[in-house]
Amino acid sequence: MAAGKGTRLKSKRPKVLHEVGGKPLLAHVIRAAAEVVPVENIYVIIGHEAERVRTAVAHTGVKFVVQSEQRGTGHAIQSARTALAQFANFLVLSGDAPLIRAETIRRMRDFHIERDATMTILTAKPSDPTGYGRILREGSTDRVAAIVEQKSLRPEQSNIGEINSGFYAFQSEPLYANIDRLSTNNPHGEYYLTDMASLLVAEGHAVMAIRAEDPDEVLGANTISELVGLDANLRMRKARDLMTLGVTVLRPETSVIDDEVRVGSDTIIEPFVQLLGNTTIGENCRVRSYSVISNSQIANDVTIRPGCIIDESSISRAAIIGPYSHLRPGSEIGESAHVGNFVETKKVRLGRSSKANHLTYLGDAEVGDSVNIGAGTITCNYDGVNKHKTVIQDGAFIGSDSTLVAPVKIGAGAYVGAASCITRDVPADSLALGRGAQVVKEGWVKKKREKK
């Protein structure tokens, strides 16, 4: 169910599109569900900002049901009657509860079928049940007698801590035979799916409860503060998962690691690192503090020194990056290459064992193997209208403070003298100098002082 607005968030975005763990709330639920049932059997009920929600998750392959008028959770399932009629049983999941695990959904499904239940309610027992509807069981059995809202609890029921999570399983036929009996006789004038429990119990149907092993799994978010709490929970879960795979995450509470990130064993992630998007990091790497890596692929044995920004780039084995390097989209760093202090790259291929260690900008360039780029070198790739390419072939040496005005090619083994402005191609094994001749006027300063 993903049709609600989320008024208490005080946001223009649909509630289910707020992100935790690097992706929308709804995307987490879809992923968990897709591990249990075929994705073509997943229907997302959309309403508020329906097309925006559809666009955000259409790539997953789910189908959609539009709840054109949002009149409560019961009304949402009424709206899906045609789509769900083909199934003898179905699950109802909350689109804003991103911590739910596939194992829990599978366990609820199997329990529902094994007990031949008409309705199964996933429950939880949080440390503080305040605000939630409570589950009244028939003695110590799995059968549910009623769901009672907190304000309706009698004094002798106040110690009941088992809550309704809002996750359900239903048999279709008895549900839809009774769903039109739901009433809007409540303060919000809405049809509540929760009320199906009492209707079905009154009809003699089996309404069962199964408790989630981890009460945090069923948590949703109604405020930004609660969203931040969910995000912290997801990211800590991700860090723990990585650590079980042999990754060292130092001070995991300071790290921001997205759900889709993959990291190899024996890699060390230092405090205050952000690993975002679909980033992949190989084995035996070290990512030092304050680095931010987005949608990038990093091979084995790579060192990322402090403070690097790496976005949509690839780094080959044993390369060393940083400190304070900025790899912009399209950067391809070769095996054992070095990109150092305050070096920026964009749409660059830096070859094997090549080095650009200090204060350099390399944009729209192809750099061969074993090239040395001196401090302060700039590839001038933009003429104000178009971008142009710089080619530096294997073994070339570019002196410090050089300016390479593209399009230009530096041949294999060529040298460019320091402080040169190169505007024409340099043949292989040649020396190029492009600077004004030095002028020395002896005694000039002494004469100036004497004149004053």
Image (tube, rainbow, N blue to C red):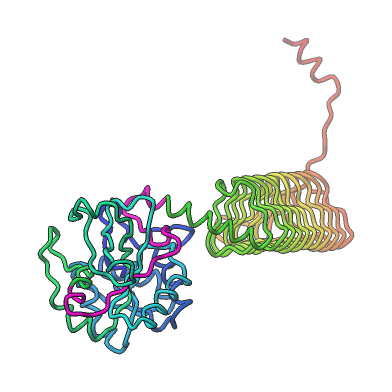
Q: Is residue 373 visible?
A: yes
Left/right of residue 404 with respect to residue 271 in the rendered view: right
Among all residues in the image, which is located at the extreme bottom? 86
Q: Give the percent coordinates (x, y) of residue 249.
A: 64, 52
Task: State the residue in front, 368 or 337.
Answer: 337
Q: Is residue 214 magenta?
A: yes
Task: State the residue in front, 8 or 53.
Answer: 8
Q: For the point 59% across and 46% down, which residue is it?
A: 272
Q: Is residue 304 magenta?
A: no
Q: For the point 71% across and 44% down, which residue is it?
A: 341
Position above or below: 333 against 77: above
Q: Give the percent coordinates (x, y) of residue 156.
A: 22, 53
Task: State the residue in front, 152 or 246.
Answer: 152
Left/right of residue 420 with respect to residue 185 in the rendered view: right
Q: Which residues are magenta?
A: 199-228
Q: Give the percent coordinates (x, y) of residue 252.
A: 58, 49
